[in-house]
Amino acid sequence: MRQKDSTSCSCSTPPVAKSDTPSDATASAGQASYHIENMDCPTEEALIRSKLAVLPGVVGLTFNLVQRRLTVSHTLPSLTPVEQALSAIGMRAVREDDTPTDQTSASAAPVAEATPTNVPWWPLALSALAALAAETIYWLNNGNHWSVVVLSLAAVLTGGLSTYKKGWIALRNRNLNMNALMSIAVTGAMAIGHWPEAAMVMALFALAEVIEAKSLDRARNAIRGLMELAPERATVQQADGTWCEVDARRVAVGSRVRVKPGERLALDGQVLEGRSTINQAPITGESLPVEKAPGDLVFAGTINESGSFEFGVTAAASHSTLARIIHAVESAQGSRAPTQRFVDQFARWYTPAVFAIALAVAIVPPLVAGGLWLDWIYKALVLLVIACPCALVISTPVSIVSGLAAAARHGILIKGGAYLEQGRKLQWLALDKTGTLTHGKPVQTDFLAWNGADPIAAREWAASLAARSDHPVSKAVARAAQVDGVGLHVVSEFAAVPGRGVSGRIGALICQLGNHRLVEDLGVCSPELERQLSLLEAEGKTVVMLIADGRVHALFAVADTVKDSSRRAIADLHFLGVKTLMLTGDNPHTAQAIAAQVGIDRAQGNLLPEDKLREVEQLALTGSVGMVGDGINDAPALARADIGFAMGAAGTDTAIETADVALMDDDLRKIPAFVRLSHATARVLWQNIALALGIKALFLVLTFTGQATMWMAVFADMGASLLVVFNGLRLLRNVAWTSRA
């Protein structure tokens, strides 16, 4: 808990951030979102879809089963028909109060809505005990007894009333979902005298449904955990100078916020006063804390480890970097990945086909081959229990959501399941140079005294001239001199020489600091100097020289240095079979030198934005291609690539909103981590599909051979559902994909 400042005993009205309170008319203008507490499984989705799709004015339905959200796109003047239709099929739909008018504010709504499943256990316990007692008496009595019938009915009523209610609604709407199939199967079992088995099936089904719902809560917790990163209150300076804790959602942009050691930041901002160390892992995935000083950006959800500081709020709570991350993850959940679309299409004909087979099993053998009606009806009922594709359909969204949430926890923001699946197919990765492979800030790498000049004097004269210039190369020379404690002289008659360098008088001497052209213009170049310049430029370095008294006194080489993480990232990508190409606007010498340092396969220099686009288009002809960049000049190529990666997206609106994958810090190693996660997710997806179909196929065979019973079929169906859910959730716990084995 935060402790209030001693001066904050009386708080004036805090600054209030502007909020949008949409009217019903606004919500009815095209989209309306509903939170449906009892929408957990594709069973409910199919029922809702069949009911709403036929309503005039409903043009689209988007389901997010993990967050239990239904978004209705419509042209209706009123949402009453939609709400009445949902009520008619037993769906407890609640309009989201904070229906967003912009995409970032949507993240606030699900915080209170994504509540854990809360089902009383006592009816399930009574149902299970009654079913067990019925089964025991049946075997002891070697047949049915009036007590068996009574106990079986008690088990069915205490454990299965909700199933019967949902099954009746489904049948009334001509929808063969799991509840309908289970209701038919249990009723049929009782009708042919299998009372104990009917009771056990209903009790097991009710228990398994609750366990499955609880398991799905774990997937919801992955998103809920992100939402809870930022505290609800912040210590804000009031108009009279006092400090007061206020609701973070009411803090306006520009407010001054104080953070104490150990606190989580509630809002994004820029440090105004004080220094501290911030743990940014929740946002960027960085393993080490980052030093923060005045002028640096800080993000909501990060942890102040040491020191107290004050920052100015740069974004309202609903528009913070964390809020945008949450919204992006939730939006990604709603978009179906290719495997999920395939499974959904498969499930559309799978259930009716199995129902038709079950009907044929019940009728054809007795009519054609003289089989016993009760035996074949029983086998048909077992088939109905096995038929539901719930395990198959739910296997994909749980796996995708787990992968998306796991990536977000490590600072990798993936904008949809399609990109998560496609990552493993990458064949080429094109990379910008400046700010992506390199730090983007030139530094002095070499200093050579020339012609027997005094090195100390040469550095002092060069630093004095460089300190007066704003050119990046001059700044690099000046920074290096400052770090080494080089003294400066007074410079008079300072002037810039366009395209060549600068000049000025130091004492009695006229000194120049400039490039190769300036040396040639002054006629002080030599073959030996040319050779030295060629050597340095071949290494990708820019060289400037100090000229005074009619001769060259020193050479200064400046280069944009490669990040340590870039070499490891490129090596990891090659290990994963991804080829690399560097695209840069720098000269070809620099491009080739940097590529050689990092291990890039190919490099292209002197490229304009349209040239980068052309190169990416050429790569796209050979296979799946990704593009990594951090600037506006990379935008066309990023848009054309199959997967666009934005570097250093923390706090950057445009990057988070437009990139397919946003790396929240500037660590290139997260791209191979993304590729490994894509491989891991694909493995889990196909494992789940194989598990779901394999178990059902096995029990179909056992049914036809007469070895499967109804309660075994329940275990087969709900057991498969639980297996695929738990297998999908492994992605949240398994972090082996974050580094190369």
Image (spheres, rainbow, N blue to C red):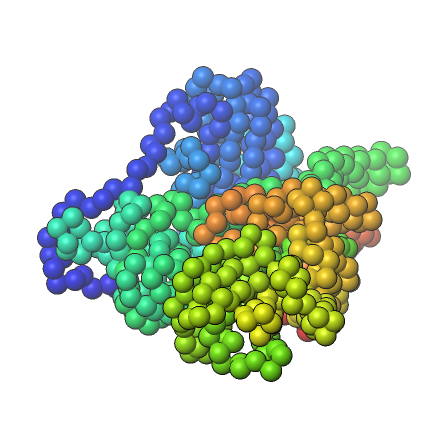
Which residue in the rendered view is the most extreme toward the right?
369
User: Which of the image's four quarters has the C terminus?
Assistant: bottom right
In this view, the residue in front, 315 or 210, is 315
Q: Is residue 734 visible?
A: no
- Image height check: is 160 above or below 176? below
Picture coordinates of residue 153 (x, y %)? 52, 45
- Image height check: is 17 above or below 301? above
In this view, the residue in front, 370 or 609, is 609
- Image height check: is 203 above or below 446? above
Picture coordinates of residue 13 (x, y %)? 16, 44
How many tags in the picture?
0
| Relative side of 219 to 738, left or right | left
Q: Residue at x 57, y 62 (%)?
A: 514
Q: Residue at x 33, y 62 (%)?
A: 294
Q: Quadrant of residue 233?
A: bottom left
In this view, the residue in front, 230 or 364, is 230
Q: Residue at x 72, y 62 (%)?
A: 589
Picture coordinates of residue 686 (x, y %)? 73, 55
